[in-house]
């Protein structure tokens, strides 16, 4: 499932490519046909993101809510548009590009009242200017659940996934099993600040990068797959050389160093 940086990058790119265009909306698969007819010929105003959710705002107050889930993806076509592939749920054609959406968990035409209810259920998104980290701290500081599970809970912090969870806790030397109410306020502030910084890097380079490029000796843009991460799926800790352990926390496999993370 895409983590928050990918979703925000999609929102940024799709706004750049299609905002201001009167789009051609179709549903080659047919499952979104009635809604596509309502959108066809309307102008796309903006694409926004909150956590792992996308929102396509059209004139006339129409909003398409998309959650890619495990299998959703966009294909982007320039100029010449091929025949649809992989059961395209929604095709949006602009002046210079066409977007094909296939396999999303959610693709629905919605309204602002429904979005307000969704936003109320989601935690603050570190990539949004309106994020209120106090909401996340209130939930973490009262919870006995492991911090490793809380960071995956989209109602606590929206947008973090399994890789960011492991990397953030390793960088800050916090064990994933530590209860949320045993995390100090200062530690939470470091978690939040690091999440903001790493997600912003992710949006910029369109990939997760948690390693310090200065330590690797390369700029972020040139780091290869094995150089971008510190602990996730690593055999040993880059800090102390101890074995990296993996187990399930929050229904996902977490990676941590028992020697460095307490």
Image (cartoon, rainbow, N blue to C red):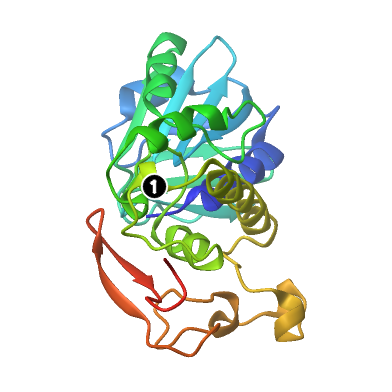
Q: Which residue is mark 1?
A: 182
Residue 189, placed above or below residue 204: above
Residue 56, placed above or below residue 184: above
Q: Residue at x 70, y 56 (%)?
A: 204
Place of residue 178 in the rendered image (x, y in percent of width and height, measured from the top left)? 34, 55
Instruction: Tell me: 66 left or right of 229.
Output: left
Residue 68 in sight from this viewpoint: no
Place of residue 262 in the rendered image (x, y in percent of width and height, measured from the top left)? 42, 66
Q: Residue at x 47, y 75 (%)?
A: 260
Place of residue 10 in the rendered image (x, y in percent of width and height, measured from the top left)? 57, 46
Q: Quadrant of residue 154?
A: top left
Place of residue 54 in the rendered image (x, y in percent of width and height, measured from the top left)? 48, 35
Residue 63, placed above or below residue 163: above
Residue 19, placed above or below residue 145: above
Q: Nearer the viewer, residue 180 or 88?
A: 180
Q: Pick the quarter of the image with the N terminus.
A: bottom left
């Amino acid at each position: 499932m895409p983590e928050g940086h990918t979703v925000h990058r999609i929102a940024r790119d799709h706004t750049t490519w299609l905002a201001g265009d009167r789009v051609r909306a179709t549903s080659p698969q047919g499952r979104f046909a009635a809604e596509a007819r309502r959108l066809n010929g309307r102008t796309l105003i903006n694409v926004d993101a909150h956590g792992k959710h996308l929102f396509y705002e059209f004139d006339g107050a129409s909003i398409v809510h998309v959650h890619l889930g495990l299998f959703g993806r966009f294909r982007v076509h320039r100029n010449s548009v091929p025949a649809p592939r992989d059961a395209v749920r929604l095709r949006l054609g602009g002046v210079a590009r066409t977007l094909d959406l296939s396999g999303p968990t959610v693709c629905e035409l919605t309204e602002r009242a429904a979005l307000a209810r969704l936003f109320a259920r989601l935690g603050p998104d570190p990539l949004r200017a309106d994020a209120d980290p106090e909401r996340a701290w209130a939930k973490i500081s009262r919870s006995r659940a492991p911090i490793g599970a809380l960071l995956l809970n989209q109602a606590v912090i929206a947008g973090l996934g399994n890789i960011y969870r492991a990397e953030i806790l390793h960088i800050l030397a916090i064990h994933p099993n530590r209860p949320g109410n045993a995390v100090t306020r200062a530690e939470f502030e470091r978690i939040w600040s690091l999440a903001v910084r790493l997600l912003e890097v992710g949006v910029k380079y369109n990939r997760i990068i948690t390693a310090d490029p200065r330590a690797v000796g390369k700029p972020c843009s040139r780091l290869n797959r094995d150089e971008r991460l510190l602990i996730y799926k690593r055999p040993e800790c880059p800090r102390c050389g101890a074995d990296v352990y993996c187990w399930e926390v929050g229904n996902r496999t977490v990676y941590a160093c028992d020697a460095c993370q307490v």
